[in-house]
Amino acid sequence: MQMACTVENCRMEDGLTVRRLRHFKCRACGARFFDDAAMHRIQTERAKFSLAHVV
């Protein structure tokens, strides 16, 4: 398995899109792997997203 560090927009299963997220991607199968920094960024963006959609 060859992992490549990449920066791209990632759409999460819940519909959230995190723009320019740095993460690792398997060159063979395209699976994405998120390190601690990426996970913190996703959590921060998700918190912003949920606050923006509170009625």
Image (cartoon, rainbow, N blue to C red):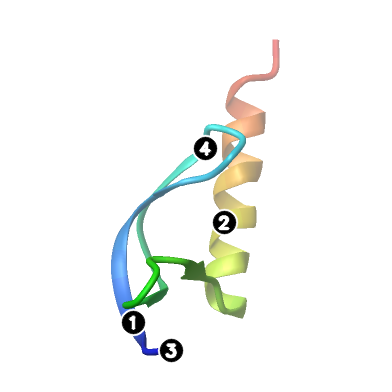
Residue that carries the numbered disc 2 in the rendered image: 42
**Sequence order check, earlier mark of 2 and 4:** 4
Mark 4 is surrounded, within 10 Å at the Cα level, by few (under 14), some (14 to 19) or many (20 or more) other residues, namely some
Q: Position of residue 50 (x, y in %)?
A: 66, 31
SS at mark 4 in the image = loop
Query: Label 2 sits on what residue type?
Result: Ile
- Name the mark nearer the viewer: 1 or 3: 3
Residue 5 numbered tag: 1
Residue drawn at (38%, 66%), measured in percent from left and top?
A: 30
What residue is shown at x 53% (from left), y 32% (from top)?
15
Q: Which residue is mark 4?
A: 16
Amino acid type for the residue under numbered disc 4: Leu
Front one among 25 and 42: 25
How far is the residue under mark 2 from the one under mark 4?
9 Å
Q: Position of residue 37 (x, y in %)?
A: 55, 76
Provide residue 39's location: percent of width, then percent of height: 61, 66
Q: Are marks 2 and 3 in contact (CB under 8 Å)?
A: no
Amino acid at pointer 1: Cys
User: How far is mark 1 from mark 4, CA to CA?
Assistant: 21 Å
Q: Helix, strand, or loop for circle 2?
A: helix
Question: What type is the residue that disc 3 sits on?
Answer: Met
Q: CA distance from mark 2 to mark 3?
A: 25 Å
Of tags 2 and 1, the one toward the viewer is 1
* In this picture, residue 42 sits left or right of residue 27: right
Of the two numbered discs 3 and 4 in the rendering, the one whose residue sits closer to the viewer: 3
Please, what secondary structure does the residue beneath circle 3 have? loop
Q: Mark 1 or mark 4, which is nearer to you?
A: 1
Q: Quadrant of the C terminus?
A: top right
Instruction: Mark 2 and mark 4 in contact? Answer it, CB < 8 Å.
Output: yes
Q: Which residue is mark 3?
A: 1
What distance separates the C-alpha of mark 1 from that of mark 3? 13 Å
- Left or right? Give the position of 49 relative to 6: right
